[in-house]
Image: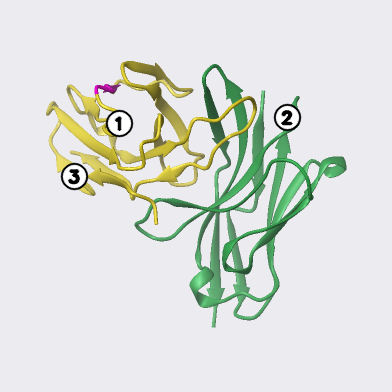
Chain colours: A yellow, B green
Amino acid sequence: EADIYQTPRYLVIGTGKKITLECSQTMGHDKMYWYQQDPGMELHLIHYSYGVNSTEKGDLSSESTVSRIRTEHFPLTLESARPSHTSQYLCASSEYGAGYQTGELFFGEGSRLTVL
Amino acid sequence: AQSVTQLGSHVSVSEGALVLLRCNYSSSVPPYLFWYVQYPNQGLQLLLKYTTGATLVKGINGFEAEFKKSETSFHLTKPSAHMSDAAEYFCAVSRYGGATNKLIFGTGTLLAVQP
């Protein structure tokens, strides 16, 4: 069982509100990721981090921001939520892999955001 | 650029029947391929992965997949479906980029198992 936790699981908020989705892992993994998931679409990588104080934007442009101050914590923030931000956000982590090896991704249960 | 294509967004089988979920990949370098499963209201869980070596890979819950380079395929199979297999299944390919190894996911296949 993966030790990666996301809160809140479900969030309904009004337009213009600031929200933070929390993600924590207890496995000591260096790499962490945020994916956005919409029905019938592939999971899109929106942010990733390969260690403390290192963050990069993913393939899908997102108005959200992330921070990585501690290894175990990788929160995602939306300064002003809009209905277009309605989606499921999945956090994941993996061990550092050398060369072309890709470690297994461990996923949290997701945060489903609805912006009215 | 690497990508995966999952044929069939919805697949329905009867309990006890063969499960076959299709995945084709595109990669300019030897790929690393994965199948993940997502049960309702949960995150994704790794079913199996192919990196190097044996092309027939066995995973959890009786699933297996075969890497066929000539067909650029990595189809997922299970000989006999159970009701508990009903879930969404995602195929993914790895992409090496900088210090991170990122996965590229397909659009998913929703498997329904009829009694």
Nearer to us: label 1 or label 3: 3
Left or right relative to B101: residue A23: left
| Residue B85: image location, x then y, percent | 53, 69
Q: Residue at x 57, y 34 (%)?
A: B104
Image quarter of residue B27: top right
Nearer to us: label 2 or label 1: 2
Q: Which residue is mark 3?
A: A11
- Please tell me if label 2 and label 1 are on a single chain: no
| Residue A99: image location, x then y, percent | 63, 24
Label 3 is found on which chain of the structure?
A
| Residue A116: image location, x then y, percent | 18, 38
Type of the residue with mark 1: Ser
Label 2 is found on which chain of the structure?
B
Q: Which quadrant holds the N terminus of chain A?
A: bottom left
Nearer to us: label 2 or label 3: 2
For marks 1 and 3, the one nearer the N-term is 3
Give whichever of B31, A1 is nearer the camera: A1
Q: Secondary structure at mark 2?
A: loop
**CA–CA distance in space, label 1 to label 3:** 14 Å
Q: Residue at x 13, y 26 (%)?
A: A16
Mark 3 Cα shell of 10 Å, populated few (<14), some (14-19), many (≥20): some
Q: Secondary structure at mark 1?
A: helix
- The disc at residue B27 is 2
- The disc at residue A84 is 1
Residue range in magenta is: A65-69
Type of the residue with mark 2: Ser
- Please tell me if label 2 and label 3 are on a single chain: no
Label 1 is found on which chain of the structure?
A
Mark 2 Cα shell of 10 Å, populated few (<14), some (14-19), many (≥20): some
- The disc at residue B59 is none
**CA–CA distance in space, label 2 to label 3:** 38 Å
